[in-house]
């Protein structure tokens, strides 16, 4: 994953077609977030998120799912308890003792 800033006014990526553009005064807009003005840090995070989604899409294809199906299913709490060997289990995405 490689978000690159071009000429201090455009962010691009080799992983996604999305872009972010500087609108002056420290503000940035991102192609998939119309109507929002972000900081450079937020715009970078948005671009990195777009890259992550692209990566999930590649993996989803391998499983025979769409990107949205994969994300939707993966964010669900697992119905399986973790192996008790470490004395911990996962709950709602957080490690519980």
Image (cartoon, rainbow, N blue to C red):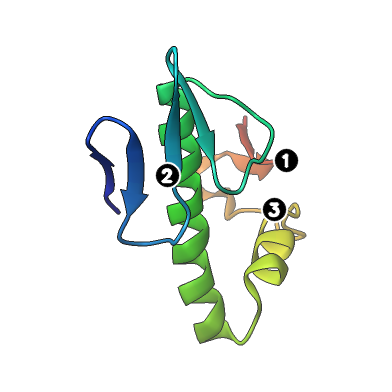
Q: Nearer the viewer, mark 3 or mark 2?
A: 2
Q: Nearer the viewer, residue 37 or 56?
A: 37
Q: Considering only order in the chain, which callout, 2 or 3, is on the residue closer to the N terminus?
A: 2
Question: Which comes sooner in the sequence, label 1 or label 3?
Answer: 3
State the mark number for residue 1: none
| Disc 1: which residue | 92
Q: Nearer the viewer, residue 7 or 70?
A: 7
Q: Residue at x 44, y 61 (%)?
A: 17
Judged by depth in the image, the label closer to the viewer, 1 or 3, is: 3
Image quadrant containing the C terminus:
top right
Q: Residue at x 69, y 33 (%)?
A: 35
Q: Nearer the viewer, residue 19 or 74?
A: 19
**What is the quadrant of the N terminus in the image?**
bottom left
Q: Nearer the viewer, mark 2 or mark 1?
A: 2
Left or right: 31, with 68 as reference point: left
- Crowding at dot 2, Cα within 10 Å, few <14 / some 14-19 / many 20+, comes out as some
Q: Quadrant of residue 91?
A: top right
Q: Secondary structure at mark 2?
A: helix
Across and down, in percent, residue 92 comes to 72, 40
Q: Residue at x 61, y 53 (%)?
A: 82
User: For numbered disc 3, what is the local secondary structure?
Assistant: loop
Q: Which residue is mark 2?
A: 48
- Mark 3 surroundings within 10 Å by alpha-carbon count, few (fewer than 14), some (14 through 19), many (20 or more): few
Residue furthest front in the image: 24
Q: Measuring 45% from the left and 40% from the top, which residue is drawn there?
A: 20
Q: Is label 1 in a helix, a strand or a loop?
A: loop
Q: Quadrant of residue 15?
A: bottom left
CA separation in Å, label 1 and label 3: 9 Å
How far apart, in angstroms, are the residues tagged by discs 3 and 2?
19 Å
Badge 3 is on which residue? 75
Distance Cα–Cα, label 2 vs label 1: 24 Å
- Above or below residue 15? Residue 86 is above
């Amino acid at each position: 994953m490689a978000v690159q800033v071009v000429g201090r006014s455009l962010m691009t990526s080799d992983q996604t077609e999305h872009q972010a553009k500087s609108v002056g005064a420290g503000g940035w807009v991102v192609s998939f977030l119309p109507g929002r003005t972000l900081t450079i840090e937020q715009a970078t995070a948005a671009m990195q998120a777009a890259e992550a989604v692209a990566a999930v899409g590649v993996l989803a294809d391998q499983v025979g799912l769409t990107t949205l199906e994969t994300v939707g299913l993966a964010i669900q709490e697992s119905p399986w308890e973790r192996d008790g060997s470490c004395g911990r289990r996962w709950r709602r995405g957080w490690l519980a003792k």
